[in-house]
Image: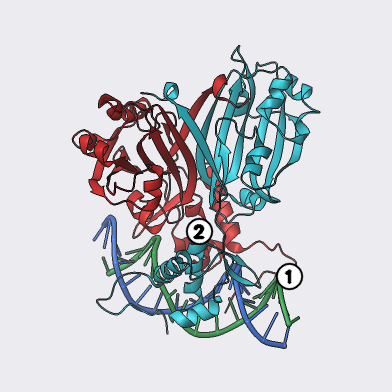
Chain colours: A red, B cyan, C blue, D green
Amino acid sequence: MPMARQEPGSARTPMHMIISEKLRKQIQNGVYAPGDQLPSEFDLGRSFGVSRTTVRRAIATLIRLGLVATQQGKGIFVKPQSKISFSLANPLTFFDSELADQGITGSIQTIQYEPIHPDPEIRARLKLPATETTVYLQEKLILADDVPIAIDLAYFPEAIGAALKDYLHNGFTYRTLAINGYDIESAEGSLESRPASYDARDLLEVPLGSPLLVYHYLAWDKQKKPLVCGETISRADRTYYSVGLKRSQLGI
Amino acid sequence: MPMARQEPGSARTPMHMIISEKLRKQIQNGVYAPGDQLPSEFDLGRSFGVSRTTVRRAIATLIRLGLVATQQGKGIFVKPQSKISFSLANPLTFFDSELADQGITGSIQTIQYEPIHPDPEIRARLKLPATETTVYLQEKLILADDVPIAIDLAYFPEAIGAALKDYLHNGFTYRTLAINGYDIESAEGSLESRPASYDARDLLEVPLGSPLLVYHYLAWDKQKKPLVCGETISRADRTYYSVGLKRSQLGI
DNA sequence: TAGTGGTCTAGACCACGGC
DNA sequence: CCGTGGTCTAGACCACTAC
């Protein structure tokens, strides 16, 4: 029997939406608590009177809303919700203490720290002269309670990168630059959100297409010479950025 | 014939992923330009040798990545990419001129401006005394070139809301507060990203689960008395926030 | 009327987890 | 071994768009 069509005159709401909305409300009302297991796809299909394909579509919606996660061979589980705060003013600067304040153990894994030949966009941001073809790329994974929550890619001009080689393995901070005589005078940044690509999905262990926060930054010294630029890509389900502004900084 | 299983020893990559990745690369390499129509689901299925269900799964991935959009009865089209910048320091303050600088016509539609009885979270943020049970809610839709890109919900203490009743219909800005004698001394905000719910999907015309940027804000006067709080919910595929920081503001 | 995407089915095989 | 989610099929009906 193909397709169970809607009774004439009944609401036009697709079954997969009815199912996902019902489950969503049950999760938000605590019928299913964080960590709880939902009924199996087979059982849900039987109790709603639909095929497994339709149930799977409803579950896919809940995954996209960040409410549940599936585990092959085990089942469907309600995800715990809680976000970690990053400060926009000093990203990753007091990373450890910032997380400690929130009751979380932070750590940084350097994935690579190597000289590379950057693409034109990075060259432009660092205002590299034509004679300089090399920058240092520091790629690191940021973990909270041993769960990856962000990737940071930082690009340093060659001289700075070489000088800081031994200092940056344990994570980058603006302070590391300052201690080594590179004084940051100003910085600019931008915050956007993008859906997770297949690559990001593998690194950050999130569903494909789930929101990621991307923080682009660029810092200069007094002579307006770029010291570092980069981007921090973080799981939007686990992180947010906060900022405080005084009167002088507001555009009033 | 059920399921076309993989040849023994071949890569384990699902067909839907092979298809979506191939189309993704073709889009990024310009084989399909923004605005172009992709082959129909039927044709894609035929050319890849898979069922339409599998093609639809691949297309669903491209939609989640924000690369294409479907139109019933018409086809699958490549989405144009371009983002509008909001300033974090003065959100919505110079909204019109900010967008004009980017070559975009901005407009604001007030959805409602009414006294309401807020939930405890808003009460706490505005530090309402127990005797005050009313705040003004201003809800508005922000359009760029007549396309909705954001929703803003602003909550004012009763006295301020009543005083500004006639001024706020044309959009809220910090400046409106200042002109009327409510001087903002400081403000704080936070930026996060959430997947679009069914409600947000309808208002902002985005796919379910696509990333939204949420900016929470709160502003005080000299006596640390809250003047306004609220949140701006914007389409992450059309907006980003930028911020500039001077040395004194960096945590170095 | 033809073509497109939107929804749904019944059933299949596979890979993983736990008993 | 069984139960779970992961992938896929072949075919159906519907709603919308364009000619």
Q: Which residue is mark 2?
A: B64
Q: Residue furthest left?
A: A166
Label 2 marks which chain's residue?
Answer: B
Instruction: Work out whether A33 lies above or below A89.
Output: below
Q: Secondary structure under badge 1?
A: loop
Please state which of the two labelled residues, at mark 1 or mark 2, is closer to the viewer. 2
In this rendering, position of residue A150 left or right of residue B80: left
In this rendering, position of residue B252 left or right of residue A250: left
Q: Position of residue B76 (x, y in %)?
A: 58, 69
Q: Residue furthest top?
A: B223
Structural crowding at the residue carrying mark 2, measured as other residues with C-alpha within 10 Å and reported as few (<14), some (14–19) or many (≥20): many
Q: CA distance from mark 1 to mark 2?
A: 33 Å
Residue sitting at x 30%, y 26%: A178
Q: Nearer the viewer, residue B116 or B173?
A: B173
Say which amino acid is labelled 1. Answer: Pro
- Residue A237 in view (yes/no): no
Q: Secondary structure under badge 2?
A: helix
In this rendering, position of residue B175 left or right of residue A122: right
Residue sitting at x 53%, y 29%: B189
Q: Position of residue C10 (x, y in %)?
A: 50, 77
Label 1 marks which chain's residue?
Answer: A
Q: Quadrant of residue C13?
A: bottom left
Instruction: Work out whether B20 lies above or below B92.
Output: below
Q: Which residue is mark 1?
A: A8
Structural crowding at the residue carrying mark 1, measured as other residues with C-alpha within 10 Å and reported as few (<14), some (14–19) or many (≥20): few
Q: What label does residue A40 carry, if any?
A: none
Q: Quadrant of residue A83?
A: top left
